[in-house]
Image (cartoon, rainbow, N blue to C red):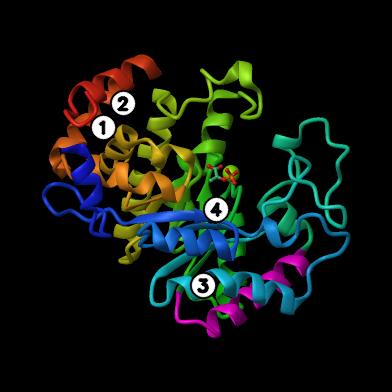
Amino acid sequence: ARASALASFDGHGRLADGHPVPLLANVATGPDAARAAAAGAEGVGLLRTEFAFLDRDTEPTHAEQVAAYGAVFAHFASKKVVIRTLDAGADKPLPFLTNTDEPNPALGVRGYRTDAASPGVLARQLAAIADAAAAHEADVWVMAPMVSTPEEAAAFTALAHAAGLPVAGVMVEVPSAALTAGHVLAHADFASLGTNDLTQYAMAADRMLGPLAALNDPWQPAVLHLVKATTDGAAAAAAATGTPKPVGVCGESAADPALAVVLAGLGVTTLSMTPRAIPAVAHVLATTTLPQAQHLAALALAAPTADAARTAVRTHLPALA
Ligand code: PEP
Ligand code: MG
C-alpha cells in the first residue's frame, strides 16, 4: 500500500482535507533543478547561490551569475523559485570576501552580515537575479540568510524591491528573528525558516559537531516553540498590514515526514527539501487533516524532550507507526 501511495503522488502536496502544503526543492545548480523538477517538486524553496561563488579568487561576473541562476529558473517556468543571496562567512569562506580569522565563525560576519558589509557584492547579485528573472517565466522570490533584526529585514527588502524584485523576504534561522517575527515580517514579504541554523543557535550546539547531534535535533521542543513564534508573528504582521506573510521551512526538518506534519500544524505554508524526500513527505501529509496536524503540533510543543515529541507524534501517524 505504501509503495502504491508513493507512486500515486500527483505533484501537489496537501493534507487529507485538501489543505495545500506545496512541496518545494532545495537546489544549488541547474542539474539539481532538473532532478527536482523530475521528482515532482512544485517549485524551488531554497536556491543556495554559494555554488556560483565557490572555488574562485574573484567575484563571478554579472553574465556568469545570470547564467547560473537562469539555469535553475529555466526548469520552473511559471513556478515559484525562492533564491537566497550569498550565505558566506568564515564557515563558508570566499577568498575575496571573508575574514577567516574569526574565533567563532557561526557567530561572525556571515549570511546577510556579509552582504551588508559588502553592499556592492549584494547589489550586483540582486541585479543579476533580476536580470535572470526577467529572462525566464519563473515566479522569483528573493531572500537574505541570517537576518537577526527588523532593521536588517527592512534594509534588505528595500534593496531587493529597488532592484526590481517584487517579492523579498528573509530566512528565519536566528532565534531573535523568530521571537520578533511580527516586527521582522512587517518589513518583509515572506519568511523561510532555516531549521538547521535555528536549531544550532537555539541549542548553542555547533551543527558541524557529531558529538552534539542529539542537541542538534529539530524535534527539540525549544525549536518548535521558535517555529510557532514565527508563524504567530507572521499572522500578526499579516493582520496588521493586510497582506499575507507566508512562512515556509527550508531546513532538513522538512524532509522528516512526521515533522512535516507538525510544521504544517504549526502554520507553515510550504516545505522545501531534498527532492528525494518529496514522495514520502507527500504520502504522510495526505494521511492527516489540518485539525489533526494542529493537534499533533500541540502534543510536540508540550513534550518535555525531543524524543518524547517524536514518539508522541509518530504514534498517532499510522503510516509511520
Ligand atoms: C538552514 O540553516 O536551515 C538552511 C536551510 O540554510 P543552510 O543549511 O544553507 O545554512
Ligand atoms: Mg542556514
Mark 3 → mark 4, Cα distance in angstroms: 29 Å
Mark 4 → mark 1, Cα distance in angstroms: 27 Å
Task: Write down the quadrant of residue 133 in the picture.
Answer: bottom right
Tag 3: residue type? Phe
Q: Which residue is mark 3?
A: 73
Tag 4: residue type? Pro
Q: Residues within 10 Å of mark 4 (few under 14, many from 20)?
A: many
Q: Provide residue 187's location: percent of width, then percent of height.
A: 49, 61
Tag 1: residue type? Ala
Mark 3 vs mark 2: which is more N-terminal? Answer: 3
Q: Which residue is mark 1?
A: 297
Give the foreground label among 3 and 1.
3
Question: Quick check: is 29 in the magenta stretch?
Answer: no
First to last magenta residue range: 119-138
Check mark 1 vs ligand 1: CB closer than 8 Å? yes or no.
Answer: no
For the residues labelled 3 and 1, say whether their Cβ atoms are less than 8 Å apart: no
In the image, taking residue 38 as reference, residue 130 lies left or right, namely right
Mark 2 → mark 4, Cα distance in angstroms: 26 Å
Quick check: can you spot residue 121? yes
The kind of secondary structure element at disc 2 is helix
The kind of secondary structure element at disc 3 is helix
Mark 2 → mark 1, Cα distance in angstroms: 6 Å
